[in-house]
Image (cartoon, grey):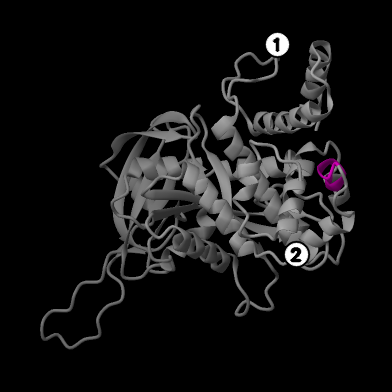
Amino acid sequence: MTRIPQIYPLVQAFVRVFTKPSLDLFSNIIIGWILCPCRKFVTAIYQFGDLHRGHAHDAYHRFFRAGKWSLDKFFQSLAMLVVGLFGHPNVLWVFGDDTVHKKTGRKVAGAKSCRDAVRSTKNRTVYAWGLQIILLCLEIIPPWGGEPLALPINMRLYRKRPSKTTGKSLLDLMREMLVDVGTWFPERKIIFVGDGFYAPLAGNLPVGVELVSRIRHDAALYRLPPKPRPGQRVRPRKRGDRLPTPSEMAKTARKWKVVETVERGKIKTRLVHVRRVVWHAVLPGKYIQLVISRDPAGKEKDDFFISTSLMLDPALVISRYADRWAIEDTFRNVKQFLGIEQPQSWKGSGPENVAAVGYALYSLIWTWFLREGNATDFPERPWYKTKERPSFADALTGFRRLIWDSRFSQTVPADLQLHKFTENIIECLSRAA
C-alpha cells in the first residue's frame, strides 16, 4: 500500500472494519478507482491501484464478492468520520432516496426489474434491469456557499420481496438506516428529508427522528377527535371533523405570511400558510404541521409540505425540502464521474459491496476536498468565466492530482526542468479520467 499523507487518515478511519490485508486492498481500490481513465472494471482498478502488484487480481474480486467485512460497521465508520468533521453538534439533517444501478446479465445477485425514474413519464413507465439502491446522506453546507452537498453515510440494497406481506419494503429499509444513525449518534436530533414516497414514514419514525416531506394535494386531513364528556357512554371517536384537502385550503386561505427561504443556495420570497392537521391514514391521533408554499409571482404551482415537528420554522421546511435535490446530484456524480455501475461483480455480496465502496469513495473525496482542497483552482476556460464554485469534477481532479504527484515524486529525480515537464504531465493526467 502506497501511503499518501493526505489520504492515509481517511483510510485509517476504517481500521476497525478490515483486517490488515483487506485494508491494503481497500486503499489500493480507492487509488485505482480514482486514477482509472477507462471503464471501472475491477481488473482496471487493480492495474492502476496496485502499482507494485502486491496482491493477485483475484484478491480484489474476492474483496467484493466474499469479503468478511461487515457493511454495517463499514458505514458506521464512514458516518463517524463525516459527521465528526462536518456534522452539527445538536441536529443532523439527512436526505434519503433510492436509485437504480443499471446492470446486464440475469445472474447478478440482487438485480431485478426496476422502474427507471429518469426515462419514465406521467403516461409511460419504463423499466430497467439492475440494483435498487437506497441511500441516506448527510447534508453539508460547503464553505463556498451555493447548493449543499449530500454525503452518503448509509446504504441498503432493496431485494425483490417474495410477496407484499413478506420481506422488507423500501420504507422498512429506510427506517432501518434511520435507526442505525440514531444509534450511532444518540445525543443528536435527526431530521429526515424525503420525497412524497417516504412521507408515510411519519407514522413509524424511530425515537428522536423527525420528518420533512411532501404531502398529496388531495390528502384526507382531519382535526383531533373531541374528548368524550364525563359520564358519556359512547365509543370514543377515532377522527375529528374532516378538513379541506391541502389544495382546497390553498384556494380559501386568507392568512398568508411572507417569508424568505434559501433554496439550493438562492434566496427566494414565498407566501406561507401553516396549519396543524391530523393525517389519519398515516399518523392517527397526532398533529403534524402542514406548510403550504406559494410563489408570490404566481409562476409556480402551490406546494404542500409536512413536518412531524410542530415547532419547525415553515421557511426552514421549504428550504430543506428544496435542498433535498443535493442527493440527486450525488446519484448523478457517482454514476457519471465515478462509474459506480461499471465494476463487474455478480455473485454473493459483490454487487452490493461495490455500490457501498463507490458511495463511500464519493464521501471521502468531498471530505478531503472540504478540508484540504483548493476551492478556487479551476481550469482556464475562456467560455466559462462566471464559474465561482467548485464541482465534484474539480474535487475529483484535485484528489487525482494529489495521487499522481505522490507517485511522480517517488520516481522522478529532483531536477528543475524535469519538474516542469512532470507538472504538465500530472495536470493532464489529473483531468484525463
- Residue 433 placement: quadrant: top right
Locate residue 286, reporting x and y percent.
31, 66
Locate residue 419, reporting x and y percent.
79, 16
Q: Which residue corresponds to mark 2?
A: 67
* Residue type (three-letter) at the residue carrying disc 2: Gly
Gap in angstroms between the C-alphas marked 2 and 1: 48 Å
Seen in the picture, residue 185 relative to 235 is either above or below; the reply is: above
The residue under the point 59% across, 20% down is 376
Q: Secondary structure at mark 1?
A: loop
Locate residue 190, reporting x and y percent.
42, 55
- Residue 382 is labelled as 1
> Would residue 14 be found to the left or right of residue 417 on screen?
left
Q: Residue furthest left?
A: 230
Locate residue 47, reporting x and y percent.
87, 44
Which region is colored magenta? 45-51
Residue 247 appears in view: no
Give the tally of numbered discs. Answer: 2
- Residue 319 placement: quadrant: top left
* Residue type (three-letter) at the residue carrying disc 1: Pro
What secondary structure predominates along the stretch shown in magenta? Answer: helix
Seen in the picture, residue 397 relative to 195 is either above or below; the reply is: above
Seen in the picture, residue 391 relative to 179 is either above or below; the reply is: above
